[in-house]
Amino acid sequence: EPEVTQTPSHQVTQMGQEVILRCVPISNHLYFYWYRQILGQKVEFLVSFYNNEISEKSEIFDDQFSVERPDGSNFTLKIRSTKLEDSAMYFCASNPAFYGYTFGSGTRLTVV
Amino acid sequence: DQQVKQNSPSLSVQEGRISILNCDYTNSMFDYFLWYKKYPAEGPTFLISISSIKDKNEDGRFTVFLNKSAKHLSLHIVPSQPGDSAVYFCAASADGAGNMLTFGGGTRLMVKP
């Protein structure tokens, strides 16, 4: 069964450093998403991406965050200057049309 | 922000019995609802969904019921199996396309053999 692949599975970074989380969505999917889950809290929407541009973003997705689809396969989330509170599990997801996303296994980001 | 709420953080059920997971919402603009299952160290896995124009959707052992007037939905698993033990999240969308999901806090289901 097709999968959404995320790398790395765990990333540790110093506060203030830039970090890039990588995702390979399912190849024929058109919609791409990033969600995050801070330990013990809800899964929260960050951003959706369609047709090479952001279609929706949440309040969390401020100027420190950016997304890119640099080639036909990768979908990246960049955090420019990480803060301690950015520590969370980050999930990438994709779907071919509406609803019923396929999520990746997540990247655990630890900011120290 | 408590637009989607799962009031039971955990639920324990005997194998073979029914599991009922509940979810309440406050935003009357939500028009599509989904249930996801999550195992440790994995991403959420889509289980079943329901549009606001329906009150029931069934897929094998899983049935979702929607009560719009009460702003309440529930997921029924019959019969429950030990492999169903996981965290279950309900999620809702108001944008007509599922571009942005609002998740509940999750309910940990434990199915005992």
Image (cartoon, coloured by chain):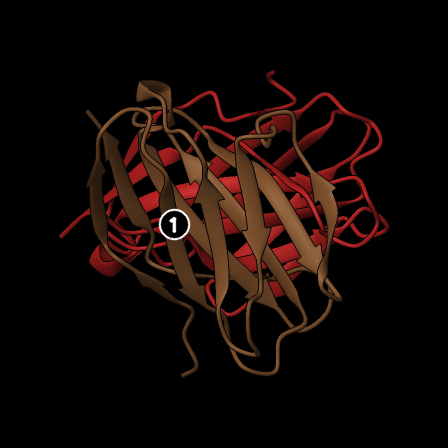
Chain colours: A brown, B red
- Give B2 or A63, whichever is nearer the viewer: A63
Residue B18 visible in the snapshot: no
Task: Report the chain holding disc 1.
Answer: A
User: In which quadrant of the rendered image does the N terminus of chain A lie?
Assistant: bottom left
Estimate the x, y position of residue B103 in percent, counting from the top left: 55, 35
- Give A67 or A81, whichever is nearer the viewer: A81
Estimate the x, y position of residue B93 in percent, counting from the top left: 72, 42
Q: Is residue B17 left or right of residue B83?
A: right
- Quarter of the rendering containing residue B110: top left
Q: Is residue A112 left or right of residue B17?
A: left
Residue at 67%, 40% (x, y): give it.
B92
Residue A31 visible in the snapshot: yes
Q: Is residue B53 left or right of residue A48?
A: right
Q: Residue under circle 1?
A: A20
Residue at 75%, 66% (x, y): give it.
A51
Q: Is residue A80 left or right of residue A57?
A: left
Residue at 39%, 44% (x, y): give it.
A90
- Quarter of the rendering containing residue B74: top right
**Which type of secondary structure does the marked residue at label 1 adopt?**
strand
The amino acid type found where label 1 is placed reads Ile
Label 1 crowd (10 A; few <14 / some 14-19 / many >=20): some
Estimate the x, y position of residue A96 in percent, counting from the top left: 66, 73
